[in-house]
Amino acid sequence: MDPQVQTKEAWSNPLEFVLYESDDQGGYVKTQNVPADRTQRREVTARGNESKFRVQVTLRTCLHGFLDDTESTPATLIVLDAQFVVVNSNKARFKSAELKLEFTNGKQGEGLSPPEVVAFAPFRTPERMNMTFDDRGSKVSLGGSLGIQALATAELRTDWERQSWYTQRYFDRGSAGTGYNPEHDCMNSVWWALQESGNPHEKHGISPFCRFAVLLKRSSQEPFEAKFSLKLDAATGFDLFDAWSFRKCQTVVDDPLKFSPFAEPQGEFQGLDAKNLGKLAADEALVALTAVPGLEPLHRAI
């Protein structure tokens, strides 16, 4: 193949990359517990501090208590803030992001069940957000001269035109779910997935700021941990420098988050009743805790 033709074909589509977690200890700096026994660190992960693609997830709220006022079932509320930002680039964007928290016992091998997911928000059902519009149209024209034999029944020339237009709606799409632990027969993990709008003229990436919440019930007052994982998908236009910058966003798996049920409430918890956290799931209040002005769900997916 002609090298010039091959080069043209190679650049006819934007560069796209998928970034997975890496267990390679030779990777970029991970987020660590410092000191090693630190509980409930505020920064869950920070990716790409020296890259155009920057991600930060922080612990907004951590509140330990009980599901109801009988105080028989320990519970924990966790709220995360996530930012997905591309700096100094006109074409690069995050196309999608998947976040996951997997909860385990802090003390392994003692037969305790891991914390179990009671409720989570947003996206308990798939939702579409940030509506955009795309006006699409088609026009068909026909024009021609008629032969002399047709003069008796038609004009000498006819022109016919039909136009049809419609407005198509596009949304960011959000979905979420839980993961099953067969050993303990419980749902001990939760995940959220964000996907950019399907509008071909509105390729602006996923929402730059999102908030996530999960309500847990616990079998004991023992410490527990959460493994956080993240998968990102980005498009970098035709810029190789942007592509390399995205690769620098790669990181090894972060240290697990450590939680202590006896730790003081952390972050934004005003108005929350630690002795009756279960009402958050029943009253849709958990959804309200994740609301971000301007990013509320606009339409539930069918």
Image (cartoon, grey):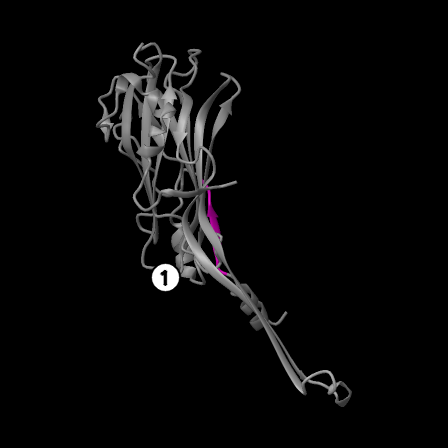
Residue 195 in view (yes/no): no
Q: Which of 79 and 271 is in front in this view?
A: 271
Count of numbered tags: 1
Q: Which of 119 and 132 is in front in this view?
A: 132
Q: Quadrant of residue 250?
A: top left
Q: Give the range drawn in magenta.
A: 14-21
Q: Residue drawn at (73%, 87%), measured in percent from left and top?
A: 151
Q: In this view, does 212 lie above or below 18?
A: above
Amino acid type at circle 1 is: Asn
Q: Position of residue 109 (x, y in %)?
A: 43, 13
Q: Is mark 1 on a helix, strand or loop?
A: loop
Residue 301 in view (yes/no): yes
Q: Position of residue 85 (x, y in %)?
A: 33, 50
> Relative to residue 291, is residue 231 drawn left or right?
right
Quadrant for the N terminus, please.
bottom right
> Relative to residue 26, is residue 150 drawn left or right?
right
Q: Where is residue 291 in the image (x, y as percent from the top left)?
A: 32, 38
Q: In which quarter of the image is residue 162?
A: bottom right
Q: Residue drawn at (29%, 33%), measured in percent from left and top?
A: 59
Residue 157: say if magenta: no
> Relative to residue 84, is residue 23 drawn left or right?
right
Q: Where is residue 48 in the image (x, y as percent from the top left)?
A: 34, 47
Q: Which residue lies furthest to the bottom in this view?
A: 148
Q: Residue furthest right?
A: 149
Packing grade of label 1 (10 A; few <14, some 14-19, many >=20) is few
Residue 18: say if magenta: yes
Which residue is disc 1 drawn over?
Answer: 90
